[in-house]
Amino acid sequence: MSEARVDLSEAGAGTHGGLDGPSPDPMKFPSSEASSSDQQGLLPAGHSASSDASPSPSAEASGLLSLPWEMVTHIASHLPAQCVITVLPKVCHALGNVGKDSTAWQLRAHRLIGSRAGFPVGPREDFDWPSACLEMEQLITCWTGQGQLVARRTQEDEEEREQARPQERARHDGELAAEGQEDGREDEIEGVGVVAQEVAYGVDEGMEVAMEGEEGKMQPIVGGDQLAGLREALEERLADDAAALMEERDHGMAFDADEGQDGALNNREDLPDPRNIGNGREVEMEQHQSPRSPSPPPALECITLPSGHIAQVNSVLLVGGEGAVCATGSRDWNVKLWDLQTGSGGTLLHTLGRQGDFSTHRGWVWCLASQGPLLASGAFDSTVRLWDLQAGGAERGLIRAGAAVLCLSYQTDVLLAGTFDKRVSLYDTRAAEPLVKSLRLHGSAVMCLAADDKYIISGSKDCTVAVYDRRAGKGLKRLRLSSYLLSMSYSGCEVWAGDNRGMLHSFSVQGGTIKPLSQFDVGHTALVTGIHRSPGSLYTCSSDRTVKVHIPCAPPRTLCTLRHQDGVNGLSVEAGILAVASGDACVEVWRPRK
């Protein structure tokens, strides 16, 4: 099981009215069925509370709508975007117009990201400002708060470890002293240090010389009384040395405790304090209880799917519209479906495959894509297999691609596959002969794909990016980069991609041409293996063992970083849910807490 650690990469930003912290939950406004008395503060006197009779902002009356329209929109800009989009239109027509003011949304967006960042990165024409603001507010609320919470817990754990170090040193010193005492007992000398041992050895030599005499003959010089007196002197000397040694040890423990943080309390269990006799369990419990400061529950929860694969998970995909089902493809040749809605940690639904087959594919499963109820899986066995999610994962087709399948893109009318033999192939999954067209757009393996109903955009290991016009049936443009792309996300007029050096690239696609916009360093130090971009969110993952959550501005504003024990091979985002596939056969799912 992988363990993720979270580091806050930047200070959190509030979603409304400033950048001081996470926003509160969306405000609850009265619905269209609310009583007229609930709307008296909004409507001028003498008007009906019906939405059909809602006044215009210029009406001469008292109430909110009597204010200048600029003031009304400014007040609304401090409400959550969710409220402006879904609630205000139900109050009255005039307030519903607030959500149609593009300038107000732009001001809100720039307040969220800061004045120095550019947004959007791509073309501004037809940009969906309300959706972008809504996504940014939700992203900041969830991930900034999550980052702050986990960072605080990590800091507290570090402080606990620092406080425990003096105790460990004292315990180690005590063990060494105990070992020294045991060694002394082997020589029949109890509780002695170096000085006491030297005295003992000297006495033995003196007794031996006295007994030998001057001529080497044995002389009974030492009598019984003398021997008894010598023994008493030795015992007194040993007792004094042992007491001095214990006093020195106690002083050293106290000194070490003063150097640590709250170390004196931690070291008490090593001292022979009579108050601890018979009460050791309570003392131990008190010492191990960390005084954590109370904090609100995090907005997100993380679940780890049970260990269903026996090799690295290369691909992960959320399907079902609301992230209800998670599909995972692994180097163990299998594709598994997981139910994320039942149980607290996810439940295995199916391991896909025909009856009698010992695995889903006959090679590494490298990519997944879905459209409606159909799921496509591509593998190193040069096949694409189709599965019907509504029929319990039953197989619906087999496509022989002719080479290892490295990337997939499933559109409403066509399935696209990028393969190791430098081709982009188009398939009609409904036809008996599914291959529609095979395109040779690159000089090396096709590593990533993105498409819509107009264009197909592909990246290759030959460091090129190609655009193909589906309607005209021809290639439009090919760009050459200094690195090759491994992951790609395409929405609206913007394309975001990650390369083999840890860099992010953004492009605009307009009028049949692709134009490079910017290149960003967000802190990844190795292959960017996955990327997801929407109008208001940006997620990236890398083989450097990190997942990063950003606002998609220029430059991207990183909200937090998730750290894993192994490289991260892919991610999927749907309805605010993030699924992450890592190299330790583990899949983590981050989702809003219910």
Image (cartoon, rainbow, N blue to C red):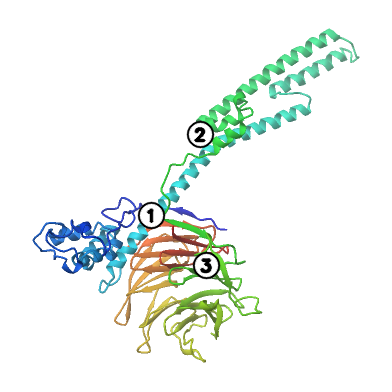
Q: Which mark is residue 339?
A: 3
Of all residues shown, which one is farthest toward the top?
A: 225
The amino acid type found where label 1 is placed reads Thr
Q: Earlier in the sequence, mark 1 or mark 2?
A: 1
> Does residue 175 sit above or below 469 in this rendering?
above
Q: Image quadrant of residue 227?
A: top right
Between the residue at mark 1 and the residue at mark 2, the CA separation in whole angstroms equals: 32 Å
Q: Which mark is residue 87?
A: none
Between the residue at mark 3 and the residue at mark 2, the CA separation in whole angstroms equals: 48 Å
Residue labelled with disc 1: 144
Residue labelled with disc 2: 260
Q: Nearer the viewer, mark 1 or mark 3?
A: 3
Query: Dot 2, how many residues are within 10 Å of its Cα: few (below 14), some (14-19), or many (20+)?
Result: some
Going 80% across and 19% down the picture, which residue do you hit? 204
Q: Position of residue 241 (x, y in %)?
A: 67, 19
Q: Nearer the viewer, mark 3 or mark 2?
A: 3
The amino acid type found where label 2 is placed reads Gly
Between the residue at mark 1 and the residue at mark 3, the CA separation in whole angstroms equals: 28 Å
Residue 557 visible here? no
